[in-house]
Image (cartoon, helix red, strand yellow):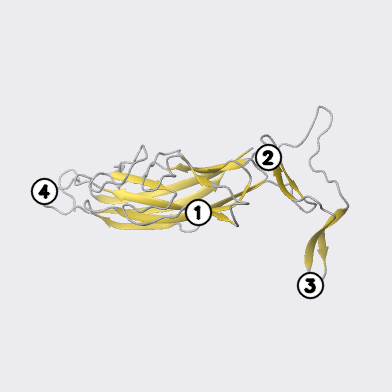
Amino acid sequence: MRVGNNYLATNAKQMVSMAIVIVCTIFTGVSAQSPESSSYRVDEYFIGPGGENDTSSANYDARASLGDTGIGNSKSASYQLYGGFTTTNDPHLELTVTASFIDFGELDASTTEVATADFSVRSYLSSGYSVTTSSPGPVNEDGYLLSPIATSTTSASGVEQFGMNLVANTSPTTFGLNPVQIPSTDYSYGSAATGYSTANNFQYNDGDTVAESSQSTGQTDYTISYIMNISPNTPAGVYNMTHLIIATPTF
């Protein structure tokens, strides 16, 4: 129902609904630096007996190495390497969104609406990654932007708010999850970024970094926890948001 300038009139019912579409992308174009001097450059090197990258028959396909005494990741404050004959030298960054559409349904000023969405990131042969958000926030058909939470704070029903975090929460209800490391914390190191890492506190700023890793990492599964509050004076309408999340490797 719309009254006057689309605002709620006394004793009139306010109709506000909300949906989010999540889109992901990856910024690339940066590669790991190879050892080099003014005369030489080494893109890949190997010390050891050897191996085979493609051992095949009609029924089997395998990669094999011989005599590798040190494999896996080794690093210092300035450098890192991956050991093993069959280790690829190609940098890799992967961002996957599990659920791409969220419907909050009809909102009410007396309650907080919550929803979750999942994405995962993994990075290989880089110094890590950052995940940023790129969208102004929920907008109705008349162009009204529902107020994003600029600084991390708690949910307040009856106060116009849109925010999110990437951790487990117990308020305004129990929802969300902390980042999950796949296969374990020995191999994966992604975390929620400052402003999005405190339970029961929410924030949203266009362009914020929301997740990150400071080193090459296995897969980290993230859960976005959204909250939505409206006030008695929030303009009625259908609010939509195309939530673009961007993963960028760092070197």
Image check: 250 left or right of 171? Answer: right
Judged from the image, the secondary structure of the residue bearing numbered disc 4 is: loop
Quarter where residue 247 is shown = top right
Q: Are marks 1 and 2 in contact (CB under 8 Å)?
A: no
Residue 91, given in percent of the width and then of the height, sits at 68, 46
| Amino acid type, mark 3 | Asn
Q: Which residue is mark 4?
A: 10
**Quarter of the image with the N terminus in it:** bottom left
Q: Residues within 10 Å of mark 4 (few under 14, many from 20)?
A: few
Q: Earlier in the sequence, mark 1 or mark 4?
A: 4
| Amino acid type, mark 1 | Phe
Residue 30, given in percent of the width and then of the height, sits at 65, 38
Q: Which mark is residue 59?
A: 3
Residue 170, given in percent of the width and then of the height, sits at 35, 54
Image check: 93 left or right of 84? Answer: left
Q: Which mark is residue 31?
A: 2
- Foreground mark, 1 or 3, reads 1
Distance from the alpha carbon under mark 3 to that under mark 2: 36 Å
